Image (cartoon, grey):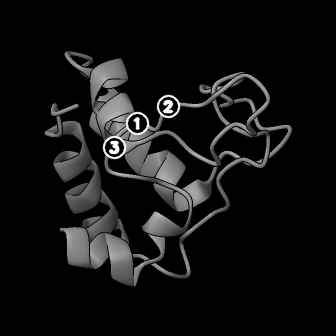
């Protein structure tokens, strides 16, 4: 899955583990896989919601700004051209299994 995430450009914004930020440092572009797994742990709608976000994005002004204040306001662009729904679901399932920190 790491290779698929790399091939599809996920690592341009996301990281495997959270990075510590200092006071005047810019917020990261996107949450880490571990942060995502922790936030959505136990939520029944997690895979469906995150798959939709991977495919449709969560750009600026989107109703789905679920990391506001923790990551930059760039938002996630739609990826429907780069990744198909099966691959998106596989990646989301893999991300949600990440618990290391």
Q: Is residue 78 above or below residue 36?
A: below
Q: Which callout, 2 or 1, points to the residue nearer the camera?
A: 2
Q: Quick one: 84 or 70, which is closer to the camera?
A: 70
Q: Image check: 57 left or right of 45? A: right
Q: Image check: 64 left or right of 36? A: right
Q: Which residue is mark 2?
A: 20
| Alpha-carbon span between mark 2 and mark 1 | 7 Å
| Alpha-carbon span between mark 3 and mark 2 | 14 Å
- Which image quarter holds the N terminus? bottom left
Residue 95 spot, x, y in % from top left = 25, 46
Q: Which callout, 3 or 2, points to the residue nearer the camera?
A: 2
Q: Which mark is residue 18?
A: 1
* Label 3 CA crowd tier, 10 Å (few <14, some 14–19, many 20+): many
Helix, strand or loop under label 1: loop
Residue 24, image quadrant: top right
* Label 2 CA crowd tier, 10 Å (few <14, some 14–19, many 20+): few
């Amino acid at each position: 899955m790491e290779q698929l995430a790399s091939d599809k450009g996920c690592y341009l914004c996301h990281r495997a583990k959270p990075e510590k930020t200092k006071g005047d440092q810019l917020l990261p572009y996107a949450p880490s896989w571990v942060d995502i797994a922790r936030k959505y742990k136990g939520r029944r709608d997690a895979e469906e919601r995150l798959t939709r976000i991977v495919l449709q994005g969560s750009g600026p002004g989107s109703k789905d700004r679920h990391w506001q204040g923790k990551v930059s306001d760039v938002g996630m662009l739609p990826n429907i051209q780069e990744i198909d729904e099966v691959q998106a679901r596989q990646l989301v399932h893999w991300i949600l299994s990440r618990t290391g920190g």
